[in-house]
Amino acid sequence: MFRGWLQRRGPGPAAYALLFLLSGAAAWGAPSNSIVYQTPSTFDPHSGPALMIHHLSLFVIQITGAIFIVVASLLAYVVVRYRQRDPQDDSEPPQIYGSTQIELAWTVIPILIVLVLFLTTARILFAIQDQKMPPTALDVDVVGHQFWWEFHYGKSGFTTANELHVPLSTEQSQMITSLNLLSADVDHSFWVPALFGKIDLIPNKVNHMWFNPDKAGMFVGQCAQFCGVEHAKMLLRVYVQTPDDFASWVKNQQQPAVQDPAAAEGRQIFESQACVSCHVIRGTSANGKFGPDLTHFKSRDTLASGAADNTPANLKLWIKDPDYVKPGSLMPAMQLSDDQIDKVVAYLDTLK
Amino acid sequence: MADSTLPIGSAVDLTPPGQVYGTWLDQVQDWVVTVDHKKIGIMYMVYALIFLLVGGLEALLLRVQLAVPHNDFLSPEVFNRLFTMHGTTMVFLMGMPLIIGFANYLVPLMVGARDMAFPRMNAFSFWMTALGGLMLYYSFIGGVGLQGAGSAPDVTWWAYAPLTERAFSRGHSTDYWALSLIVSGFGTIGAAVNIIATTLCMRCKGMTLFRMPLLVWLYLVVSGMILVTISPLTAAQIMLVIDRYLGGHFFDSQAGGAPIVWMHFFWVFGHPEVYVLVLPAFAIANEVIPVFSRKAIFGYPAMVAASAGIGLISLSVWAHHMFTVGMTSAQNAFFVLSTGLVGVPTGIKIFNWIATMWGGKIRFATPMLFCTAFIAQFLFAGLTGIMLSTAPWNWQLHNSYFVVAHFHYVLVGAIVFCFLGGFYYWYPKMTGKMLDERMGKWSFWLFVIGFHMTFDFMHIPGLLGMPRSIYTYEPGRGWDTWNMIVSIGAMVQAVGILIFAYNLVYSYFKGPDAGPDPWDAWTLEWATTSPPPAYNFASEPVVASRRPLWDLKHPEDPDSRYE
Amino acid sequence: MSTSTIPLAHGVAHEDWSQPYHGTVAMLALIVAETAIFSIFVVAYIYYIGKSISGPQPRQVLELPIFNTVCLLSSSFTIWIAERALKKSSMGAFRLWWAITVVLGAIFLVGTGLEWKKLIYQDGLTISTNLFGTTFYSLVGLHASHVIVGLTMLLIVLIFSLAGKIKKEHSRQLEVLSLYWHFVDAVWVVVFTVVYIIGR
């Protein structure tokens, strides 16, 4: 069903040279099962839509590159050939006011080029945007908040935040992830360059994007529409997992929160403080919708939407003074004592 | 080089305008109450140059912050204010006054008129624009915002709702943004009305519309565009103020309002606005390139048609700024086509300029250096624009540093370059002194090198996934080196601009006398003294072709024979 | 370089060199700009038709302002008559028809004011009630503010003419003013159609 997007002939050697120059060695990476794609290069596509866009971009670069070379060469020629040689020479060159044939030619040819570009673009545009979603697609609702991402896996019955896990798609078993994008406050934009072009999250509007990642690994991205003070720190991670890994991740996320008796004190503090008015921890009394779901907080690699690695030390800093980690974030400083914070950190550390 | 004033019509007053100045206060009052288009034009230009330096300083601060990842030179609040102000300043307080200033100075002279059609409204328009700018900058010290005093707007220059609604933008910063631009917008519309009336009603005898200099044609198109472009912004800002102060719901998603309405209204303004800014750059190129190539412009009628075509088509392309908001595929496709089509007349102009230079005897004085660099840079900018017009690829490039690089390529590489060329070309006319050529060449080369260091390499982080409007970025994403190069280039550009600014002041006092026609040019402004007397021409000129001075200098081969 | 002193005078027959009156051109340009502003408010109005989540709906509270409309649109006719009278130098007729124009415009404004009074106090519709309220008051209010400006100018001219200062030579300038007045009336046709016919 999706083989169509491989129709276009491969990019020429010049394009690969350009690619190499531009994408930096980091983007290539060795073939492996689980790599971190640390450079979000648009020239390193890893899903159907991204690949289609990539091919379009190479086509456009070739055409515009050719135009540039032709016209710039003419300009360079003119600058050299027709400069005034003798500064004393006051005579005027022959005055030429125009030429209908030449002007007609350089009107018609650009129009034709524009039409070719348009038709190619339109074909890919419709192919991506109007793609029908198969019933087997993984449906995830993405809700943008200031300054974090909410991922709601409706069919599986759980919600998580900031790190999106999706299944790998292979030739044998195509797995499409279908995203419905909404916003809880202002405009945001979901951008993971390796996987697809960005799509905005706009209040009162549901947008849609799909992708089928072809390599397992972790892909980085971030919010791409200015949404306030901490727009720069609204980072994004997409973990593409093999079907087995993905299934076990889902199973884990579906469980209610881990009840570790060793961390009971911390849990008590959490439940008695205002934390519960913003956060959900399924299986406890915490049921707030304003902040990220913390049920499986420790299963995530970062906190504060990528602002810091998810370590106890960082978590302690975050709870004590969020403004230090992410100045202007909407999480208030909780005014807990150091001892209380340590216990809460220990509790949150158990929420795998 | 012609060294005497050419009489057109009848004897021209050769007395230099050596008025007896009164006290310093008298001189200030003279400028404050003036309705002389030349003085008003110069005030617009000085205003623009001041804000060029201010906006440039803001840019330098931004680039210091972005030179390395996770930098803490600026806090996110300050960074967001600075980049909002940088954009707003450069577009509204530098770009618009600059183009209107040149129009004010040159249009009446080029059509052989004594002044603009409405001199008092002309002054009023300037002061409204000036007031708007002062209001905007007052925000740095006035009012208290959410983060304390210093509530300059921090919502980006396109100020998307609902971020600008009361709920998300507390304090007054957004109000400064909206109100100051509404005020200066009235000034801009007034200037546009004036230019249209002058062009259509005040031409000297014999100057039919198709004998006007191309600069005048382009300003006619620009003024028409301003009428239908600034108005949507004013309307949208009024709606925003109604939302913020009268409890309106235009962009209030809680009440069913749609943020996308703001986006459409803003870009219906925003896209034609950039053509409003760039067409005057074309106007300058249309005057400078022929004179320094010693040839008439190639294809005058086509240039007129192309200018009008650009003006018209540019009104239909706005949603190419919105490819990612979730419009239908058919809507997206329409804007791909219209954006591609607007590139056709633009390309035609580039070809016409090269054809003008073809077969000429090109003299590379500083104005021509800037305009030649402009052609190459505008070509490149236009092509990255075509890249951005292909919607699926736009989904990757939108809101990334690729876009920032593209539009700076146009705004700086095309517009600022042409206007710098324009300054070097018309400064002798305005002041009677030549700008220092050596400093001119230094400022050119430094600026060009700095420009390319910054904006060529800026495309790369965009292609590697770096979004815009971020106060810092993550290390290890392949963006670090490029950002450092970009920042260094900004410093180099700053030096070039400072040399230019110094040149302006130095040459005013120490520059050699220019005479009425230092460049051996062909349009009417060179037929009077430098600077022109208050009344411009002692008697109304009479013309018979597009290049009246060419006809006078070459009576054996006048243009009028060929038109 | 040639320093010819022969004045250039061949080419166009300069006796019939004429260009339009700059006042008219400027007013037309202003009308273009104002049309653009009104268009944006009209588009917003149309976009939000039927999208109010709560509060009074147009059908419930809006009555067709027939009388007001007739007054305003006939004022376009009366101002035209006044202009014609001025061109024939019949100052009495001019003053009469100009005064009638002012009165008709004032009736329109008063009518709008009464309509708003009813909407605010009886129906509870303000600019902040819902999307209908916001877009209605913005659009109709923008139009009304333009009527106020126009009426003020008309009044000033009326006062001058009563003092005997208006002459036949001023007809070009008054034509410019009446162009503005016709524009205001034309905008009302659009607003009336969009708000009271399409939107209800």
Image (spheres, grey):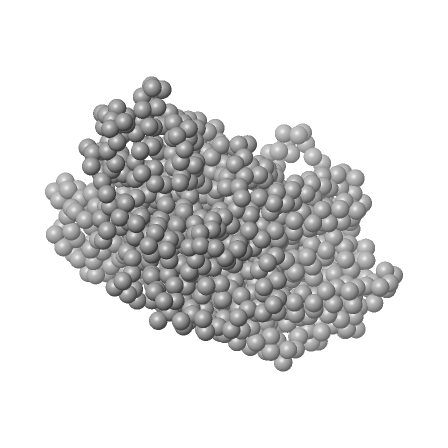
Res. A12 image quadrant: bottom right
Q: Given the current orientation, which residue lies at the most extreme bottom position?
A: A101
Q: Is A121 displayed left or right of A299 in the figure?
A: right
Tell me residue B496's x, y (percent): 69, 44
Residue at image position (34%, 65%) is A173
Placement of the N terminus of chain B among the 4 image quadrants:
bottom right
Relative to residue C135, is residue A331 depicted above or below? above
Placement of the C terminus of chain B among the 4 image quadrants:
bottom right
Res. B298 image quadrant: bottom right
Residue at image position (47%, 59%) is A45
Counting labels gives: 0
Residue at image position (36%, 44%) is A162
Tell me residue A29's x, y (percent): 53, 54
Relative to residue C190, is residue B302 depicted above or below? below
Q: Nearer the viewer, residue B330 or B98?
A: B330
Q: Is B227 displayed left or right of C42 in the figure?
A: right
Q: Is residue A198 visible?
A: yes
Q: Is A235 displayed left or right of A343 in the figure?
A: right
Q: Nearer the viewer, residue B61 or B362?
A: B61
Q: Is residue A186 visible?
A: no
Residue at image position (26%, 31%) is A260
Relative to residue A328, is residue B547 depicted above or below? below
Tell me residue B11's x, y (percent): 74, 57
Tell me residue A188's x, y (percent): 37, 47
Q: Nearer the viewer, residue B491 or C56?
A: B491
